[in-house]
Structures are given as structure tokens and as C-alpha cells.
Amino acid sequence: MHHLVAPSLLAADFLHLAEEVDMVNESEADLFHVDVMDGHFVPNISFGFSIIRQIKSLAKKPLDVHLMIKHPDQYLEDFRDSGADWLSVHYETCPHLHRTIHKIRELGMKPGVVINPHNNVELLKGILHDVDFVLLMSVNPGFGGQKFIPSTLERIRTLNKMKIELNPELLIEVDGGVDEHNAADLVNAGADILVAGSSVFKASDPLKAISSLKQAI
Ligand code: DX5
Ligand code: ZN
């Protein structure tokens, strides 16, 4: 499978959000990555339902909504109703992860689990069979524009081995500090989806930036 590219709207210009969404619609990108932050699980607040609904009204590609919030269970239905197609929750926020993941699927979304850089991917062994994708954080979540953590490559390789054994359909997504310089290494290590915020939206030519991420191999 050719890998997917998911531009993260966190880095978009919110005064021109419609143009930014249109740019992604017309690009080679596959998904919209949508970062929700609550100021509790992560030290930053991003945006919520009404913005997601507006993005959804223009988006021609699925919304991959990444929840960086405490108590995600309270809001799963609201995110579905706002237009989330893929919904991922952090391992670190879900004491009853199996229940949460199954609830997301019952609501009609693709469930994913996200894991912070300090946590070993082996912790996900028991849930790999139930999720459609794992989102590996390659920075500490909360902010765009941070530096890629190099040990992520080894984590992708380890997860890829687990995937072959436990759920060959699983998609591995990587988020944080992804750019045209590390994209090929990530894909070669086993990444199926590259999230990119700053390297797309802060580029002088975002379409070209998306294209080079898409071509990385
Ligand atoms: C960080 C978010 C990322 C962020 C990535 O907490 O989960 O999706 O937007 O931004 P860049 O690509 O700039 O590191
Ligand atoms: Zn994200």
C-alpha cells in the first residue's frame, strides 16, 4: 500500500480556514488531521465541535480527529455528530480502553489509539486487534512545530512487528515533526500515514510540500 498523508489543520491559518481546507481538498493528501486539545491532558487548548463541523462542511476527504483530552468517553457521540470519520484516543487517558474503542466503532467511526513518546508500544498488545490504526506520537503532544524525536523510528519498527503478528490490517500513523527530510525513513520503518502540520501549512508552497511527503519512499 502506498502511504497516506494527513495535513494537520492545527498549523493552518484560521482566518482563512476555507482556503486552507480547499487547498487540502485539491492536494494529494488523503485525510484531514484535526487536533483537539483541552488544556488538561495537554498544556494547550485548540478548538472544538463548531470548528470541526465547519471544516466538515467543506472537506472532501475524511476527518481524522485526534483527541488530546481527559475523559474522551463523555464526548464520543458529539465528535461523531461534528463529522469525525476516524477518532483516536490516547492510551494515557483511557482506563477502559477496550470499551472506549468499541464504543467508537459502534458509533460508526474508525477507532484508533494514540501513544505518547515515553510509553512502550508493547503496552498496546492487548488492543491491537480492536483498533484500525495506532497513532504514534513523535513529539510530546500539545503543540505544533516541535522537533521530531528520533527514537520514534525504532518504535515504528517494533510496532510493525507486532502488527504482522496480531493485526496485519492495522495502519501505523506518525504525528509530530514530520517533514520531507524524515518522511522516507518513517515510511521505510513501517509508517502508513504521515501527519504533518508546520511542514505543510508553513511551507511557501503547501501543495508541493504535500506532494513531496506523498512521494517519500
Ligand atoms: C501535536 C499534534 C500534531 C501537530 C503536529 O500535539 O498532535 O498533530 O499538529 O504538528 P507538526 O507537524 O508541526 O509537528
Ligand atoms: Zn495530532
Image: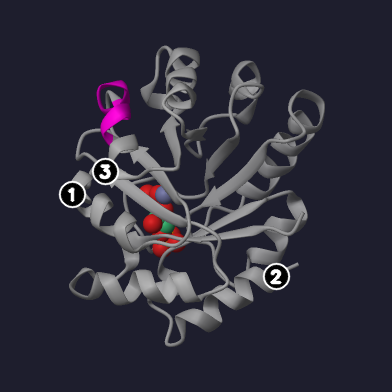
Q: Which residues are magenta?
A: 72-78
From the viewer's perspective, is residue 98 above or below residue 170?
Answer: above
Image coords of residue 179 (percent x, y): 55, 69
Label 1 vs label 2, nearer the camera: 1
Residue type, label 3: Met
Residue at disc 1, CB closer than 8 Å to ligand 2 = no
Label 1 sits on a secondary structure element that is helix
Please tell me which of labels 3 and 2 falls first in the chain.
3
What residue would you read off at disc 2?
216
How many residues crowd mark 1 within 10 Å: few (<14), some (14–19), many (20+)? few
Residue type, label 2: Ala
Q: Nearer the viewer, residue 130 or 115?
A: 130
Label 3 sits on a secondary structure element that is strand
How many residues crowd mark 2 within 10 Å: few (<14), some (14–19), many (20+)? some
What residue would you read off at disc 3?
37
Residue at disc 3, CB closer than 8 Å to ligand 1 = yes
User: Quarter holding the N terminus?
Assistant: bottom right
Please tell me which of labels 1 and 2 falls first in the chain.
1
Q: CA distance from mark 1 to mark 2?
A: 34 Å
Residue drawn at x 22%, y 47% as measured from the top left: 44
How many residues crowd mark 3 within 10 Å: few (<14), some (14–19), many (20+)? many
Q: Is residue 75 magenta?
A: yes
